[in-house]
């Protein structure tokens, strides 16, 4: 494990140590009485974790062996914000044993403003053709409504500058790793869209003291 990864994890642990845990019914979009609903499964997994530090990628594993990272999309803004440091903690180690690279893709997607990722999606000819068949204009405005934007804003609204800096530095590390491996660089797009402006916020030096 690299010293850079260890430093980033220390950064997350320091700045998110006192993150307030939301109430159990504010963690995921649940559907009581319908255990097959993915939001209900997300609620069962995350609501029983006492702290964000207790998260492990294996909790998302399904019997077929893969990680069901779609469950992250069913976290309420408060649930996503609370568990984000735990998600990033594991996502930073792309070579980890629990399909961490798949987790990283999902976490980065959750941190990318919806208007921005749709710019790329609208370049997909299959998506555009599907929209046209449904009579839906292939525009950003046709796909992103105000509630989606509001939900994204709510995810990060409570983060302090130091916490935003921790997230930004984690994304910067992932962007370098994605580039080195020749992966589609979604972390860099997230930085360009929003998080890059926080890269200089309250870093934790290697000796662990507050900057």
Image (cartoon, helix red, strand yellow):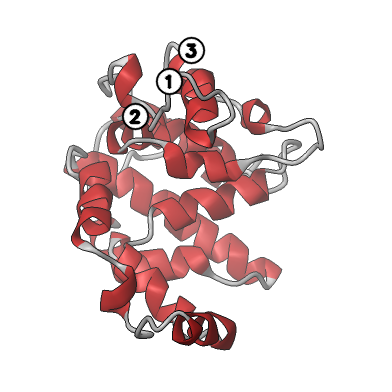
| Residue drawn at point x = 72 percent, y = 43 percent | 99
Q: Mark number for residue 82?
A: 2
Numbered disc in front, either 3 or 2: 3
Give the mark count.
Answer: 3
The local crowd at label 1, few if under 14, some if 14 to 19, many if 20 or more residues have their Cα within 10 Å, is few
- Mark 1 or 2: in front is 1
Locate the N terminus by quadrant. Answer: top right
The span from disc 1 to disc 2 (Cα, nearest Å) is: 22 Å
Marker disc for residue 81: none
Q: Is residue 59 left or right of residue 44?
A: right
Q: Is residue 115 above or below residue 29?
A: below
Q: Position of residue 185 (x, y in %)?
A: 54, 70
- Secondary structure, mark 2, is helix
Residue 7 seen in render? no
Residue 92 image-quadrant placement: top right
Q: Earlier in the sequence, mark 3 or mark 1?
A: 1
User: Nearer the viewer's eye, disc 3 or disc 1?
Assistant: 1
With 28 as the anchor, is 67 left or right in this view? Answer: right
Please report contact status of discs 1 and 2: CB closer than 8 Å, yes or no. no
- Labels 3 and 1 touching (C-beta < 8 A): no
Q: Which residue is mark 3?
A: 48
Residue 102: image x %, image y %?
65, 50
The residue labelled by disc 1 is 32
- Disc 3 versus disc 2: distance between alpha carbons? 13 Å
Measured as percent of width and height from the top left, residue 177 is found at: 60, 61
- Counting residues from the start of the chain, the first of labels 3 and 2 encountered is 3
User: For the residues marked 3 and 1, what is the alpha-carbon distance in whole angstroms?
Assistant: 16 Å
């Amino acid at each position: 494990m690299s010293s850079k990864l260890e430093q980033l994890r220390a950064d997350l642990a320091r700045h998110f140590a006192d993150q307030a845990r939301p109430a159990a019914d504010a963690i995921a979009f649940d559907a009581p009485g319908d255990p097959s609903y993915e939001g209900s499964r997300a609620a069962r997994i995350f609501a029983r974790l006492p702290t964000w530090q207790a998260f492990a990628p294996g909790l998302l594993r399904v019997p077929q062996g893969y990680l069901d990272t779609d469950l992250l999309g069913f976290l309420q803004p408060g649930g996503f914000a609370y568990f984000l440091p735990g998600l990033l903690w594991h996502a930073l180690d792309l070579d980890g044993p629990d399909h961490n690279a798949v987790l990283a893709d999902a976490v980065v997607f959750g941190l990318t403003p919806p208007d921005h990722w749709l710019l790329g999606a609208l370049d997909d000819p299959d998506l555009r053709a599907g929209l046209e068949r449904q009579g839906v204009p292939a525009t950003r405005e046709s796909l992103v409504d105000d509630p989606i934007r509001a939900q994204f804003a709510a995810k990060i609204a409570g983060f302090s500058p130091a916490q935003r800096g921790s997230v930004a530095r984690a994304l910067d590390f992932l962007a370098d790793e994605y580039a080195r491996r020749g992966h589609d660089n979604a972390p860099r797009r997230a930085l360009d869209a929003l998080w890059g402006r926080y890269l200089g916020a309250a870093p934790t030096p290697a000796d662990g003291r507050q900057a």
